[in-house]
Amino acid sequence: MKKEKIAVAYSGGLDTSVIVKWLQEKYNADVVTVTGNLGQKKELVGVPEKAYKTGAKKVYVQDLQKEFVEEYIFRALKAGALYEHTYPMATALGRPLLAKALVEVALREKCTAVAHGCTGKGNDQVRFETAVAALAPHLKVLVPLRDWEFKSREEEIAYCEKHDIPVKATKDSPYSIDENIWGTSIECGILEDPMVEPPADAYQRTVSPQEAPDKPTYVTIEFKEGVPVGLNGKKISGVELIHVLNDIAGANGVGRIDLVENRLIGIKSREIYEAPAAVTLHFAHRELERLTLEKEVMHYKMKISHDYATIIYNGLWFTPLRPALDAFINETQKTVNGTVKVKLYKGNVDIAGRTSPNSLYDTKLATYTVEDTFDHKASEGFIKIFSLSVKTYYRVNTNGFKAKKKGIKTRLKKKV
């Protein structure tokens, strides 16, 4: 019988640390770990050593930051994709890229299967397995968390202690944390009670708004075709821009999100997110679009933004609809050029100014001064045509209109 060789999507956290040893025991398998550097910092420390100590035969740690920013994050930013109008989806955006890296290593190493550490009631299992199905439909996917004997994180921690597996999670601090350059998600433990305010130790990369500086910080962000290309007058790479903005905005308490969201599988989940750069960039990008997009395009794009966010959240990145929507979005972004100035102050992001060579704001049309060039007389004919269908309806349905008027008078008498 051919020995199993399994590629594991490995973060070095509690679940994936247990998985490496568990797969060896369960399948007598050779395990190859695959870790993607998506800009996380703490999670990468000691990952190769930990993987080898846990029993991995081969360890891959790949720097995917540039690809993540340019091919995933900036596509979502241009789309204005915020799940349920709030969540920038740092974790959801990272999963298809991590799955892609996992598949590439699995094929290179001639693995018989891949495995991930997602739970049986979360979103990430869908994201990983849908991506694998699209990229390598012949690969078998193993999901230990849906099959193994452990019923709680406490039992997993005990397993690690038994096998001398180093993990950061403890019984006193059982948070599950996922971090990348676009944001951090924190769940489990006391956070599962939506009535409990998140403890200070739950936050990883932002200061409390109360402890943020007493003076606001101003930041200017330059965009070209919807993509941020400069910060405070300096042209820098996308990766560097996000890292720097994370530090600046995080120091001002910006980017904390406490959200009860609707998971793909149908349950509600309370999640804590920190996304300083993401919150700031989405805000600035939206303000620039207000200045540069034609009204009908802007309103229609709002619908697309919702659909695009749902695609990302539901793990459908590698499906035909997403690149089709990219074509529409990229067309809208051709005029989204210019600079936005934002004010960061104690957890808030406010607009402090915006300018664009493609600005559709015309002072002479908008002003109420003597410089006004708007033709006020043209409005009379416009309103007659605009209201014609309403006028026709009520002219024909006179009884209905009278009944409404009578009801209004009756209510007014009762109030008197």
Image: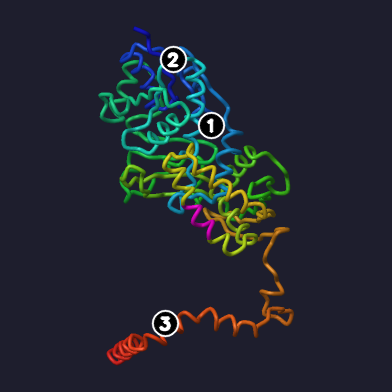
Magenta span: 300-306
Percent across and percent down for residue 181 are 55, 37
Please name which of the two marks, 2 or 3, marks the residue nearer to the observer: 3
Main secondary structure of the magenta stretch: helix
Q: Amino acid at mark 2?
A: Ala
Residue annotated with mark 2? 56
Alpha carbons under labels 3 and 1: distance apart: 63 Å
Q: Are marks 3 and 1 in contact (CB under 8 Å)?
A: no
Residue annotated with mark 3? 393
Residue annotated with mark 1? 41
Alpha carbons under labels 2 and 3: distance apart: 74 Å
Q: Are marks 2 and 3 in contact (CB under 8 Å)?
A: no
Task: Give the camera-side residue of 376 and 355.
Answer: 376
Percent across and percent down for residue 390 are 45, 80
Q: Amino acid at mark 3?
A: Tyr
Please name which of the two marks, 3 or 1, marks the residue nearer to the observer: 3
